[in-house]
Amino acid sequence: MKITQVTPVVTQLTRLRFVNAFLVREDDGLTLVDTTMGKAADDLLDAARAVGAPIKRIALTHGHGDHVGGLDALKERLGDSVVVLMPDLDARIHDGESVVEGKVPGSWPTLQTKPDVRLAAGDRVGSLEVVATPGHTPGHVAFLDTRDRTLIAGDVYTTYGRAAVTNHFYIRFPLAAMATWDKGKDLESARALRALEPTILTVGHGPLIRNPTAAMDAAIARAESA
Ligand SMILES: [Zn+2]
């Protein structure tokens, strides 16, 4: 697992050059944002040990398998010492509810772990503010670190080569658009994240971008004409 220091309090963990999770430091320990895939649990726990604090919370941007894949194994190891938070609509999809018309694309693996908290817009997870960003999935959320406006954007953007909104086909990472549920809402969410004026953009797939607003503007312009 590749470890990148994003800020003094946020660490990016990259698995197989493909998918990112994040450790966010708080006074009482760490929030892990996303869990990458199955079999990642031990590597994620090692990374937390290297940071020097226990994982107290697991907060998920959305319910796709490459973000929740490590959840059950982590919950098995951490037990009741960890609180699991998932966006409300994606938690209901995992529960077998049909919350929208038609099929929701992407991988939705069966989870043993039920979230303790269903996230809604405006909720706080430690220093992170929950931002509703539906489109890639019905319940997708992003997390804004209110200490310095570092943004954890999940799969609203990818950043391989350059920033791209996941509402349209992009050759460097076509999977993201294929797994996107509502392309119009996804583009609206990309605009909403840009309007937050983040200082750093981090995403589920791709490297971080510092001072990202120009790159986000360009990505939105390409997405509008795609
Ligand atoms: Zn996804």
Image (spheres, helix red, strand yellow):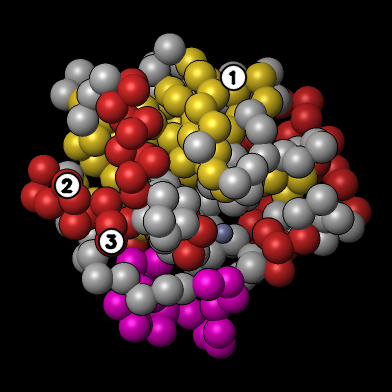
Image quarter where ligand 1 lies: bottom right
Q: Residue at x 68, y 26 (%)?
A: 209
Answer yes or no: is residue 196 visible.
Answer: no
Rendered image: mark on residue 72: 3
Magenta stretch: give its range.
Answer: 89-107
> Residue 50 falls in which quadrant of the image?
top left
Does the magenta run of residues contain 2? no
Q: Could you say where residue 226 lies in the image, as x and y percent from the top left?
A: 89, 57
Give the amino acid type for the residue marked by disc 1 in the picture. Thr
Q: Earlier in the sequence, mark 1 or mark 2?
A: 2
Q: Could you say where residue 159 lies in the image, as x and y percent from the top left?
A: 72, 39
Q: Nearer the viewer, mark 1 or mark 2?
A: 2
Classify residue 78 as left or right of residue 12. left
Q: Could you say where residue 46 lies in the image, as x and y percent from the top left?
A: 33, 34
Q: Nearer the viewer, mark 1 or mark 3?
A: 3
> Residue 157 falls in which quadrant of the image?
top right
Rate crowding at label 1 as few (under 14), some (14 to 19) or many (20 or more) other CA atoms within 10 Å: some
Q: Residue at x 59, y 46 (%)?
A: 16
Give the amino acid type for the residue marked by disc 3 in the picture. Asp
Q: Residue furthest bottom?
A: 102
